[in-house]
Image (cartoon, rainbow, N blue to C red):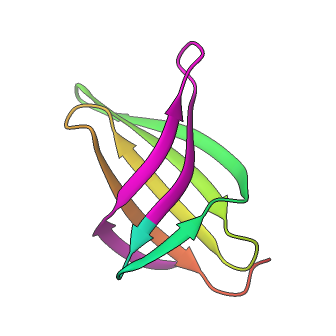
């Protein structure tokens, strides 16, 4: 995985319960459709919880991170040609 660590705009479905499902994201003026969430996990640092999503657009693999404290999304990493 190549580290990116860039803020991105994400379209996500919230609910039911505490479920969050990213469905698309914008990066470098291009919109990517999430075709599959391959893995999800969470990490806590102090009072901040980060929700991590390994997602695929059908070709490449991306790691999206949602910071629950500031409610911002980050594209953390990219792996080209995964799908």
Name the residue at the top extreme: 17
Asked whether residue 8 appears in the rendered view, the answer is yes
User: Residue 37, image x and y in percent?
Assistant: 70, 51
Closest to the observer: 21 or 66? Answer: 21
Which quarter shows the N terminus? bottom right
| Residue in the image at 23% along x and 29% along y | 46
Residue placed most toward the observer, 23 or 51? 23
Q: Is residue 35 magenta?
A: no
Main SS of the magenta part reads strand
At x 41%, y 65%, the residue is: 76
Check the picture and name the quadrant holding the C terminus.
Answer: bottom right
In this picture, residue 1 sits left or right of residue 68: right
Residue 14 sits inside the magenta stretch: yes
Query: Percent position (x, y) of residue 59?
Result: 73, 79
In the image, residue 14 lies at what x, y percent? 50, 27
In the rendered structure, which segment of residues is drawn in magenta?
A: 1-25
Above or below: residue 27 compared with residue 18: below
């Amino acid at each position: 995985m190549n580290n990116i660590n860039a803020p991105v705009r994400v379209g996500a479905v919230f609910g039911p319960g505490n479920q969050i499902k990213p469905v698309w994201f914008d990066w470098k003026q291009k919109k990517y459709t999430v075709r599959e969430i391959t893995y999800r996990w969470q990490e806590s640092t102090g009072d901040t919880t980060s929700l991590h999503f390994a997602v695929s657009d059908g070709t490449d693999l991306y790691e999206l991170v949602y910071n629950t404290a500031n409610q911002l999304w980050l594209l953390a990493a990219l792996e080209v040609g995964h799908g």
